[in-house]
Amino acid sequence: MDNGIVGHAYVFTYTPLALESTQNLVQSLGDELVGQTLAPVEFETLFARRLRLLGRTGLVTIACAGLDMATWDALAKLHDLPLAALLDGRVKPVPAYDSHNMDGEEIGLLRAGRAMEAGLRAIKMKIGYRDLAEDCHIVELIQRQIGDDIALMVDCNQSLSVPEVMHRIRTLQPYGLAWVEEPTLQEDYAGHARIRATGGMPIQMGENWCGVGEMQWALDANACDLVMPDVMKIGEMAGRLKAATLAELRGLPMSSHIFQEISAHLLAVTPTAHWLERMGLADRILRDPCNSRMSPPLCPTPLVPECLGRSRRWRVTSRNEVCLRAACSGFCCARLRVVFGRPVAANQGTSILCLCERRGSPAARRPSAVFGNYAARPSRACLRARTVRDGRALSRRSAAAI
């Protein structure tokens, strides 16, 4: 805004191929907000009206969510409040688990050891290896490392057929896993219900629900025991708050999916809050990442702007940033800056889009109400539109051919 208050957010496109399209959507949708009062709920209504025929799915959902999160952050900063307090809650400790990949033995044991050293009381790992014996071997190996006092969850990433999952779950039952996440195709609610009916372990899903309607359909189909909607996909902040109410009505524990910085605030106002997923998705563009301040075994209050107005570290120097007029109040206009960020993991070729602060305004150096005293790193971290594949840096033009 013209008074220097700036909202911060980032979005995750899963593939660098979607970065430029998402940036264009953010810019076009942001232009629609210029001249509007800074009222995020009204923006949600505006997007719904303007996008009714196009539909709010896919990249449109991602772009809307990025702008929505940034405007909520700007509103919280305007009122000098953490986001949780603005939502009539308070910032409080949130149980967090460490989220791992399909790491294999050596890396899996190393990451499990680091999570234990950090004092975390739960770990999630990905399974769905070539055969059941390999799944059992890695689960047993990690469980032996962490012991019985630390919960172990597994994520199949939609990789298995319904009959195969049912067979594997029966075999994995003795390990007492805390949940099995997305065991089969996420849109196969009937399949999830069949898997759940086999009993033995709680079924977790929700990160790919695109809107609260899809959550409702899944719950009506008895597809899961636990829910974890993604704030970027569920329908912006309004959708996430509706999802929390729906989970409360159904008596279902709700966890978060990535976006740990804003999710810590949202879980603080979620009646059935369960676990915060700790995954440093934005660590490469944050000077002081959330997971470096988590106080084991909880994520306490790293997002509270306790030194609001005293930080002087906010600055972005990347040359390939696009200034975007995005949100307004009746007397002042907000600017967002769209930055092509580093890929999250070099071997996956995935990238994020960061919406961060305008450079040059003294008040823009104030900490974010969502990200606390965090700042985007200088240009070496806020890279130009580049991605990495097989360890090699590629230009945007080369990346488009991947």
Image: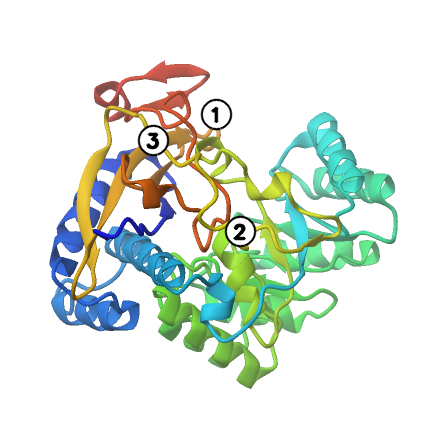
Residue 186 picture location, percent across and down:
46, 59
- Tell me which residue sits at (69%, 28%) in the image: 107
Crowd band around label 2 with a 10 angstrom C-alpha radius: few (<14), some (14–19), many (20+): many
Judging by the rendered image, the residue that carries numbered circle 1 is: 347
Q: Nearer the viewer, mark 2 or mark 1?
A: 2
Mark 2 and 1 residues: CB-CB less than 8 Å, in contact?
Answer: no
Crowd band around label 3 with a 10 angstrom C-alpha radius: few (<14), some (14–19), many (20+): many
On screen, 2 above or below 104? below
Whether residue 227 is visible here, answered yes or no, is no
Looking at the image, which is closer to me, 101 or 26? Answer: 26
Looking at the image, which is closer to me, 243 or 177? Answer: 243
Q: Secondary structure at mark 1?
A: loop
Left or right of 125 on screen, residue 285: left
Whether residue 15 is visible here, answered yes or no, is yes
On screen, 90 above or below 5? below
Mark 1 residue type: Asn
Left or right of 111 on screen, residue 338: left
Q: CA distance from mark 2 to mark 3?
A: 22 Å
Does label 2 or label 1 sit earlier along the sequence?
Answer: 2
Mark 3 residue type: Val
Total count of labels:
3
- Tell me which residue sits at (63%, 38%) in the image: 292
- Tell me which residue sits at (32%, 17%) in the image: 394
On screen, 133 above or below 304? above
Q: Would you identify the image quadrant in which residue 251 lies?
A: bottom right
Judging by the rendered image, the residue that carries numbered circle 3 is: 316
Q: CA distance from mark 2 to mark 1?
A: 22 Å
User: Which residue is outermost to the bottom?
Assistant: 249
Residue 228 picture location, percent across and down:
53, 63
Judging by the rendered image, the residue that carries numbered circle 2 is: 260
Residue 172 picture location, percent across and down:
76, 53
In the image, which disc is placed on residue 145?
A: none
